[in-house]
Structure formats: structure tokens, C-alpha cells
Amino acid sequence: MKIALATILAFSSVCPAFAGEYQPGYSSSKTCTRNEYREEYVPGTQNSPGYVKSYTETIDVPCESNRATTVRRAAPQSVGDNNDCSEGSIIGGLLGAGIATAGSRGKDQWWAIPAGGAAGAMLGCQIDGG
């Protein structure tokens, strides 16, 4: 038991040496910089003339990747039938039922009104653009 405990303690001090190692497949960070030359005019007075102060500034920039960039394009929208013939169906149904009522008498009216309405709705939908 003492040997096992000593072995664990001996190898546990080695493990922190592997902690900073890079493992493929995990994210990594990289900072890229660029030196940029700048000039600034300092205005003067009558007794002390103005001058130009120049300096170089280090700024952080996005790193260029060697990987191929993926360009995502929007998928074209499928053009479906956007014709809405609901107004034509309603108007055609009413007109068809009215014409069927006017043209029928007696016992024939009970089936002529719904038949005329259905036929008028289909015709009205076709006329309206459906």
C-alpha cells in the first residue's frame, strides 16, 4: 500500500508538465499584431512654432487563416403558388347559388343551391387567378 501511494505521489508531480500541451481538435488562440505609423500635428503659437509628432503604434488585427473559408449563400426560396383565390371563391359561390336559386323551382331547390354554390366557387377561384 505504501509503494502504491508513493508511486501515485511521484507521478502526480509529472502531470502538471503535460497540462499546457496542445491537443489537436481543441480550440487555440493566437494574437496577431501590426505596427502602424502615425503622425500627429501639435499646433504652435507665435512664440513657439508647431511641430509634427510621429510614432509607431502596435495594434491587434484578425489573424489570417490558412484554411479555406466557407462562403455561405442563402438557399433560393422555392416559389410556390401564391395565388389566393378566396375572394373569387366566395363571390363565385354566392353568384352560383343565386343563379341556381333563380333557375330552379320547388323540390329542385334543395340540391340546386349547394351545387350552384360549389360550381360558382370553383369557377370564381379560376377567374381570380387560382
Image (spheres, rainbow, N blue to C red):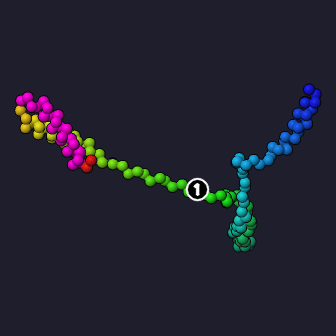
Residue 88 visible: no
Q: Position of residue 28 (x, y in %)?
A: 72, 50
Query: In the displayed image of the protein, which residue is found farthest to the top?
Result: 1
The count of marks equals 1
Quadrant for the N terminus in the image = top right
- Disc 1 marks which residue? 70
Which portion, as a residue range, is magenta? Answer: 106-128
Residue 105 drawn above or below residue 85: above
Left or right, 32 with respect to 20, comes to: left
Give residue 14's quadrant in the image: top right
Q: Main secondary structure of the magenta part?
A: helix
Q: Position of residue 34 (x, y in %)?
A: 71, 62
Q: Residue at x 91, y 36 (%)?
A: 10
What secondary structure is found at the residue carrying circle 1?
Answer: loop
Q: In this orientation, which residue lies closer to the viewer: 57 or 35?
A: 35
Q: Residue at x 7, y 35 (%)?
A: 104
Give residue 4's quadrant in the image: top right
Residue 124 drawn above or below residue 73: above
**Is 116 contained in the magenta span?**
yes
